[in-house]
Image (cartoon, rainbow, N blue to C red):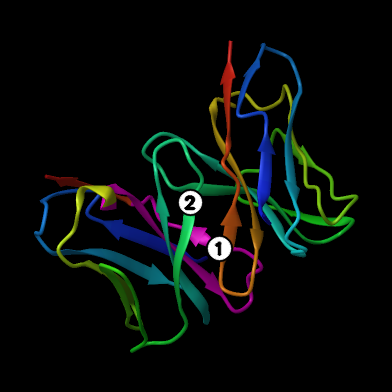
Amino acid sequence: EDQVTQSPEALRLQEGESSSLNCSYTVSGLRGLFWYRQDPGKGPEFLFTLYSAGEEKEKERLKATLTKKESFLHITAPKPEDSATYLCAVQGTNAGKSTFGDGTTLTVKP
Amino acid sequence: DGGITQSPKYLFRKEGQNVTLSCEQNLNHDAMYWYRQDPGQGLRLIYYSQIVNDFQKGDIAEGYSVSREKKESFPLTVTSAQKNPTAFYLCASEHLYGYTFGSGTRLTVV
C-alpha cells in the first residue's frame, strides 16, 4: 500500500526566511510524485510532478526535489501570499489513483 | 475556460436523507476522482473512474455511490448509510501531469 508522510504539520516563517517542507513516501514503482497548493476553502492547485530520483522543478520561489525515499519543497524568500497548505501525493505504476499526505500548513508573516 | 465545476458549493443534509453532489468537466479527461477532506487532514479517496461506465471503490467507499454515464459527468451520492458525512468533498480529473480539482462542496449534516 502506498504511503505518504508530510512534515512538519505546520510551519510559521517570517517574510524572507527560507525553509523546506518534507514528503516521505513508500510506493511500489513510482509513476509520479506530485505537489499541490491548497488555499482555505478551495480545491488544490497543481504545482509540480517529479518522476525520478535526482529530478528538480522550479516555479517562482518554489523548488521541488526528489530522492528515492522523499521529496522536498524548498521555499526561498517567501512572501505572505505563499501562505497555504501544501499537499504531496504519489502514484505507483500499478495504481490508477494518487495517495495524498496530510499536508503542511505554511504561514508567512510580513 | 476548461475546468471542473462542482455544485452546490454548500449542501445541508438531514438525517436519513440521500444527497447528490455534482461534478462536471470540460477538459476531455478520461479519469475522474472523488476525495473527502476532513479538517486538518489530507485527501481520502472515495471512488474513481478511468473510463465511462466503469468505476472502482477507493479507501472509504462505504455509504457512497457514483455513476459514470457520460465522460463529462461523475456525480457522487452520499447515502443515509454514511454516518459521518460532514466534510469537504473534492472532485478531480487526471491530466498528463497530475490532477485538476474542482472548487469543492462543503456538506453539513443538520
Residue pointed to by mark 2:
A44
Does B7 sit above or below residue A59? above
Examine the structure image and report whether residue B34 is included in the region drawn in magenta.
no
Amino acid type for the residue under numbered disc 2: Pro
Amino acid type for the residue under numbered disc 1: Ser
> How far apart in space, not on screen, are marks 1 and 2 (Cα)?
13 Å
Does B43 sit above or below residue A33? above
- Quadrant of res B10: top right
* Residue neighbourhood size for the residue with mark 1, other residues' Cα within 10 Å, grouped as few (<14), some (14–19), many (≥20): many
| Residue A12 seen in this snapshot | yes
Span highlighted in magenta in the image: A82-103
In this picture, residue A88 sits left or right of residue A95? left
Q: Nearer the viewer, mark 1 or mark 2?
A: 2
**Residue A55, percent from left and from top:** 37, 86
- Marks 1 and 2 in Cβ contact (< 8 Å): no
Does B66 sit above or below residue B71? above
Residue pointed to by mark 1:
A98
Does B71 sit above or below residue A83? below
